[in-house]
């Protein structure tokens, strides 16, 4: 599928900064407990970037701030240079920032194609999307959904009910549904959670295909072999603070990471 189908452009004059997402001193508290404290880092366009850290480090809260579920108490989230303050999640999706969740949010009683079409909610009229497939066979929405599934080699499942499919396939369908909103940045919350080794490797290859189409990936995951095989850069959090931001290969040499994340003292 051409890059323009995903809302992307290879035109040099349309390239702005090399940074697609910039977080500036993000802080967030709940009930007097500071969950995020002055977190700042950038995500480069076209990169595959991981956000890791122990449980309770603040990773999910930061994802929720980026996607618009929570507003930060202080700081800025800039997407393609524009401040997202006050912008609801739905509008952020329409602007090119989409997200998949750790717990699959597909509708199990619907077919794959129907679930994928629902991912276009920021682009199409809701009533067009809830028509039975037989009534909307010529719709633009359905055509694009089938094309997107085909571009990743999983269109053979388009007519099957989601509940009948293996968990690993459902994970891919969840990502494809997120792609239907034509994101330039895709947030992935624990994409490898619950997968066996074969499914994890298949998902990694699938996400590399997504990346090859020019879509920037930012993911949270605890599976370090998966992160190492997929991502180029990593940001590490601990107790709401950023303790490392750099190349994957530098993780094992960083004292803060060894002590806080890997549980090893230098």
Image (spheres, grey):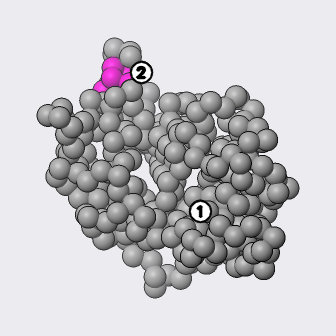
In the rendered structure, the answer to whether residue 84 lies left or right of residue 11 reads left
**SS state under label 1:** loop
- x and y, in percent, of residue 7 in the image: 55, 75
Q: Specify start and end residues of the magenta stretch as a single range.
A: 254-261
In the rendered structure, the answer to whether residue 23 lies left or right of residue 187 reads left
208 shown above or below 15: above
- x and y, in percent, of residue 202 in the image: 73, 41
Mark 2 lies on residue: 262
- x and y, in percent, of residue 248 in the image: 47, 39
Dot 2 or dot 1, earlier in sequence = 1
* Residue at 39% from the left image edge and 55% from the top image edge: 67
Mark 1 lies on residue: 119
**SS state under label 2:** loop
104 shown above or below 193: below
Residue placed most toward the observer, 171 or 120: 120
Tell me the quarter of the picture where residue 143 sits: bottom right
Q: CA distance from mark 2 to mark 1?
A: 37 Å
Whether the magenta-drawn stretch holds residue 258 is answered as yes
* Residue at 46% from the left image edge and 82% from the top image edge: 14
21 shown above or below 220: below
Whether the magenta-drawn stretch holds residue 129 is answered as no
- x and y, in percent, of residue 44 in the image: 43, 59
Of badges 2 and 1, nearer the viewer stands 1
Q: Residues within 10 Å of mark 2 (few under 14, many from 20)?
A: some
Residue placed most toward the observer, 7 or 45: 7
The residue at the far left in this view is 32
């Amino acid at each position: 599928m051409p890059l323009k189908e995903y809302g992307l452009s290879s035109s040099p004059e349309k390239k702005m900064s090399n940074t697609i997402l910039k977080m500036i001193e993000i802080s967030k508290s709940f009930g007097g407990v500071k969950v995020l404290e002055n977190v700042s880092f950038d995500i480069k366009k076209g990169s595959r970037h991981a956000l890791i850290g122990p449980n309770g480090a603040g990773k999910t809260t930061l994802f929720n701030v980026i996607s618009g579920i929570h507003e930060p108490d202080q700081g800025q989230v800039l997407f393609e240079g524009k401040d997202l303050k006050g912008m609801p999640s739905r509008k952020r999706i329409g602007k090119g920032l989409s997200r998949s969740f750790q717990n699959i949010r597909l509708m199990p009683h619907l077919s794959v194609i129907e679930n994928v079409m629902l991912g276009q909610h920021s682009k199409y009229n809701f009533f067009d999307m809830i028509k039975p497939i037989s009534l909307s066979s010529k719709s633009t929405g359905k055509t694009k959904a089938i094309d997107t599934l085909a571009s990743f080699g999983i269109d053979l499942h388009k007519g099957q009910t989601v509940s009948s499919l293996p968990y690993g396939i459902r994970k891919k369908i969840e990502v494809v549904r997120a792609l239907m909103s034509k994101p330039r940045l895709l947030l992935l919350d624990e994409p490898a959670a619950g997968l066996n080794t074969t499914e994890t490797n298949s998902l990694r290859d699938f996400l590399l295909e997504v990346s090859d189409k020019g879509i920037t990936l930012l993911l949270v995951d605890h599976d370090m072999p998966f992160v190492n095989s997929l991502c180029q850069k990593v940001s590490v959090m601990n107790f709401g603070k950023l303790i490392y931001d750099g190349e994957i290969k530098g993780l094992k040499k960083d004292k803060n990471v060894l002590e806080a994340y890997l549980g090893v003292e230098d």
